[in-house]
Amino acid sequence: MNRGENGEAVLPGDIARRVIDPHAYAQWDGLLDTFDAIRAETPVVKVQPDTPGLFDPFWLVTRYDDVMRISKDNATFLNNPRPVVFSFNQAIEFSRAATGSNMLVDSLVVFDAPIHPKYRKLTQEWFMPRNLAQLEGELRALAARTVDNMIAAGPEVDFVKLVSGPYPLRVVMQILGVPPEDEFRMQMLTQQLFGGQDKDLSGSGMENMTPEQVVQIVAGAVKTFEDYFAQIAEDRRRNPTNDVASVIANALVDGKPLPPRDMAGYYIIVATAGHDTTSASTAGAMQALARDPEQFARVRTDRSLLPGIVEEAIRWTSPVQHFMRTAAEDVEIGGQQVRKGDWLMINYVAANHDPAQFPDPRSFDAARSPNRHLAFGAGAHQCLGLHLARLEMRILFEALLDRVAAVEPAGSASRASSTFVGGLKTLPLRITPA
Ligand code: HEM
């Protein structure tokens, strides 16, 4: 560990690079080793670029207790005005040039009080278990179709491609009123929107473009999203249904409907927050079951084990790997003096593998109790869709356990290279139908 100008703990350059390098996140065990070493020596530590201007320095927070404290203290640790996801300065400049904002879309995650609670309240009830119960029938039908497709493609399948990718995507699209025929277009637009920011997103075709071209494409994608969702909102105002799209379309804040940009932001945050995250945890649960045939056999006959498996998969995978906060005032945390305006990374992967909170944190223990993980965050911004994520996963695995007698790995799985939302990219399995 090094010391900075004011005596603060600073991460040595080679380790700092791993914290901000998307490729380091593709090597899970290596990543956990890195966070274990950092947490043991300096649980709160400054990360700064070795090339000045590449990114703004920030405090990395790795201990469970510290991440919990920051998450719950929304007055001291703000989601605005600095970006709420780690970004290189060039990406932040793209975003500002294209949209006038640090983040490409303004939404719940970038609002603080007093705006945040007003926007959050609009859909909070819709996402509660009592209301979600009405989705169960549709989810069961979708889960059954998805698993049947996988079995038809078997016995060797890529679980990510056939199940854990498409199923959560269809769920969020459905609740947002996007028909199946527009799903691909929405995926492409999302890639255009975030492809300029995520250096690692291959296939976006943006690697070879000038900054001006990227800004143009991103601004175009935002506009297309706005127009698309404005149409859905128009329809839901005339013909409201019981979906979340109708709630957003008819919502009033301070007596007025949401402006088009905020409405699009709301739809986009639900679409993006609800997809890759649930996919990653679903794939992780399946990977754990495939590696442990006895556990698979047990849960087939005793479905009461399923909620424990789902919860542990969410901790074990921690798909949202971090969020950023900005200090609203000087504050001490983990023995370090954080100054007003400083940027902090609350790292959920590190917190959810903190041995002080989770004994033997790398093992998948479906009976872990308590399992008060931070994969959904905590405090005012705690995941809005957490009940939906759990419900989706439980229903999918019920359908799967009804139809699959046994499952085993059929090759090595691979992880995405991303510092923000991460998880398995491929999961080859051999399936034995029931
Ligand atoms: C926020 C994780 C699924 C919608 C968050 C946050 C995390 C998270 C860590 C930030 C919490 C904080 O700042 O304290 C996850 C994980 C999921 C998942 C791990 C799946 C396993 C979903 C689903 C939806 C959703 C299915 C909706 C369909 C949201 C929204 C926010 C959010 C709208 C912003 C809330 C706010 O800022 O007030 N999620 N999420 N998430 N999530 Fe999820």
Image (spheres, rainbow, N blue to C red):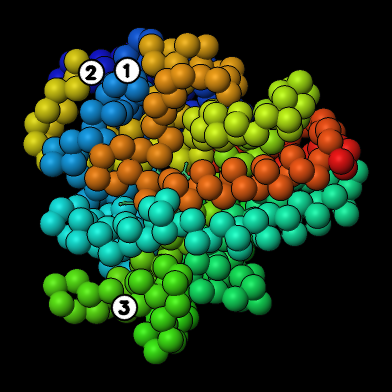
224 or 342, nearer to the observer:
224
- Measured as percent of width and height from the top left, residue 276 is found at 55, 50
As drawn, the residue found furthest toward the left would be: 329
51 or 412, nearer to the observer:
412
Ligand 1 within 8 Å, label 2 CB: no
As displayed, is residue 276 above or below residue 20?
Answer: below
Residue with the mark numbered 2: 334
| Amino acid of disc 1 | Pro
Do labels 2 and 1 touch, CB within 8 Å? yes
Residue with the mark numbered 3: 250
Q: Residues within 10 Å of mark 1 (few under 14, many from 20)?
A: many
Ligand 1 within 8 Å, label 3 CB: no
As displayed, is residue 152 above or below residue 225?
Answer: above
Task: Name the secondary structure under disc 2.
Answer: loop
| Amino acid of disc 3 | Asn
Residue 333's quadrant in the figure? top left
- Measured as percent of width and height from the top left, residue 93 is found at 34, 58
Mark 2 and mark 1: span between their CA atoms?
A: 6 Å
Which of the two discs, 2 and 1, labels the residue nearer the N terminus? 1
Residue with the mark numbered 1: 43
33 sits to left or right of 107? right
- Measured as percent of width and height from the top left, residue 421 is found at 50, 44
Mark 3 and mark 2: span between their CA atoms?
A: 45 Å
Mark 3 and mark 1: span between their CA atoms?
A: 45 Å
